[in-house]
Image (cartoon, grey):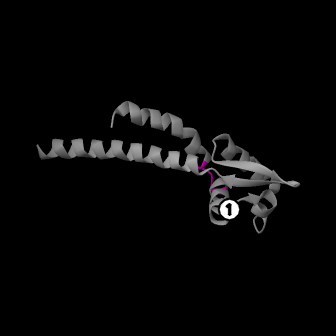
C-alpha cells in the first residue's frame, strides 16, 4: 500500500472518527444499530441525556454522514447510513495494511 493512500485515508477519515470519539455519540450509534430508526424522544428514553444534547450529537453525526433523518408526522426519525460505516471500515483496512507493511519491513530488517 502506498504511503499516499494511507495519508489520504487518515485525512478523509479524521472527521468521521472524531465524531465517533464521544461516548454519547457511540451510545446513539449503538442504539440506532440495535433498534433501527428512532426519534429523539425514543433516543432519550431511560437515559440521562437531554433531548437538546442528543440533538446536538445527532447533528455532529449527520455532519459527517453517519446518520440522517426523515420527517414522520411531527417527529424526525434518525437512522444510520451504512455506506459511511463501510467507508470507515475501508479506512481502517488501509491503515491496517500500512502497519502490516511496516511490521514486515521491520521483521526483514531484524532478521537480516
Report the residue marked by disc 1: 36
Stretch of the chain drawn in magenta: 20-24
Q: Residue at x 67, y 56 (%)?
A: 24
Depicted 17 relative to depicted 40: above or below: above
Does 9 sit left or right of 79 as displayed? left
User: On the rendered structure, is 14 left or right of 6?
Assistant: right
**80 lies left or right of 56:** left
Tell me which corner region of the image, top left, top right, bottom left or bottom right, holds residue 3.
Answer: top left
Task: Give the structural element (helix, strand or loop) at label 1.
Answer: loop
Most common secondary structure along the magenta stretch: loop
Closer-to-camera residue (10/82): 82
In x, y percent, where is residue 47?
A: 75, 65
Left or right: 54, with 25 as reference point: right
Q: Quadrant of residue 28?
A: bottom right
The residue lying at 62 percent from left, 51 percent from top is: 22
The C terminus lies in quadrant: top left
The spot of residue 31 in percent (x, y) is 66, 63
User: Residue most toward the bottom?
Assistant: 46
Q: Position of residue 27 (x, y in %)?
A: 65, 60
Say if the magenta span includes residue 55: no
In the rendering, at what x and y percent does residue 57 appear? Answer: 71, 49
Q: Report the residue that reaches farthest toward the top.
A: 4
Amino acid at each position: 500500500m502506498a504511503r499516499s493512500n494511507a495519508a489520504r485515508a487518515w485525512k478523509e477519515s479524521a472527521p468521521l472518527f472524531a465524531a465517533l470519539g464521544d461516548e454519547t455519540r457511540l451510545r446513539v450509534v449503538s442504539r440506532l444499530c440495535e433498534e433501527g430508526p428512532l426519534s429523539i424522544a425514543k433516543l432519550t428514553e431511560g437515559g440521562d441525556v437531554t433531548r437538546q444534547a442528543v440533538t446536538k450529537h445527532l447533528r455532529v453525526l449527520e455532519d459527517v454522514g453517519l446518520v440522517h433523518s426523515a420527517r414522520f408526522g411531527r417527529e424526525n426519525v434518525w437512522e444510520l447510513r451504512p455506506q459511511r460505516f463501510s467507508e470507515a471500515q475501508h479506512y481502517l483496512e488501509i491503515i491496517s495494511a500500512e502497519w502490516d507493511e511496516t511490521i514486515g519491513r521491520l521483521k526483514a530488517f531484524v532478521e537480516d
